[in-house]
Amino acid sequence: MRKSLRRSAATAAVAAVLPLLALTTTPAQAAATADHAGMTWTVTGKGTDGTVHVSSDASTNAYNGDTPATATLSVLCLRVTGVPAPAGVNPGFYDGWGAGTVAATPPVQGTTLTSRAVADDLCVQYYGTGWRMAEHHDGRYGPNLEYSGGWSFWAYGYVPEGVRFWTAIDGQPANPWS
């Protein structure tokens, strides 16, 4: 009888705690790895003034992701400094100005990108304070660059050509952590 009461009390205690665990566990804690396809970009142009054009292309899927999280790619990083667009870069909605510098991390498996914060931290780890993962809408245009465009942008910096980069997108399930 005593054993039965102890088992019942233990079962009741576990049953009482399980709903609390569900409320306090975040999705990132629940999943040790990211498993959603992520959106990727590539380099589509370079300027003679140290600028680079990073962009979506025919392989990019900004709505569902285009590359399995099991792929190993660099993260496209951006540090916005407010630098004005150089002569020759005429920002528009589809071809904005990043107002800063881009760089790429060493390749990482998309499964490690469990949140935007994790991806941003990777950029900080390699390049320092103020760096973060580049996002689909980082291109600016219009008077005083007050509008946000999408699909590509120009920035200063160097990223290798002929490869793809993990690039974030807000508002769409197209990130490895989505």
Image (spheres, rainbow, N blue to C red):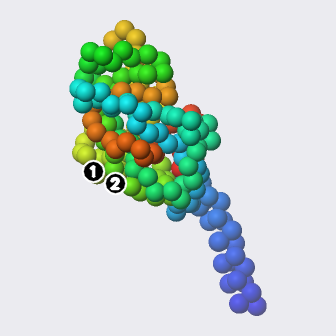
Q: Is residue 100 visible?
A: no
**Residue at horizontal 45%, vertical 33%?**
55
Measured Cα–Cα span from mark 2 to mark 1: 9 Å
Label 2 secondary element: loop
For the N terminus, give its image quadrant: bottom right
Q: Of the residues shown, which amino acid type is indicated by label 1?
A: Tyr
Image vertical order of residue 59 relative to residue 112, above or below: above
Residue 42: where, in percent of width, then height? 44, 39
**Residue at horizontal 57%, vertical 53%?**
68
Q: Quadrant of residue 173?
A: top right
Q: Which residue lies most toward the top here?
A: 143
Q: In the image, 144: left or right of 63? A: left
Label 1 secondary element: helix
The answer to whether marks 2 and 1 mark residues whose Cβ atoms lie closer than 8 Å is yes
Q: Quadrant of residue 165?
A: top left
Q: Is residue 94 visible?
A: yes
First of labels 2, 1 by sequence position: 2
**Residue at horizontal 58%, vertical 43%?**
65
* Count of numbered marks: 2
How crowded is the residue under tag 1: few (<14 C-alpha within 10 Å), some, or many (20+)?
A: some
Q: In the image, 114: left or right of 132? A: right
**For mark 1, what is the residue?**
126
Q: In the image, 161: left or right of 19? A: left
**For mark 2, what is the residue?**
106
**Residue at horizontal 37%, vertical 8%?**
143
Image vertical order of residue 72 relative to residue 58, above or below: below
Image vertical order of residue 30 relative to residue 86, above or below: below
Residue 123: where, in percent of width, then height? 33, 46
Q: Quadrant of residue 120?
A: top left
Q: Which mark is residue 97?
A: none
- Which is in the foreground here, disc 2 or disc 1? 2
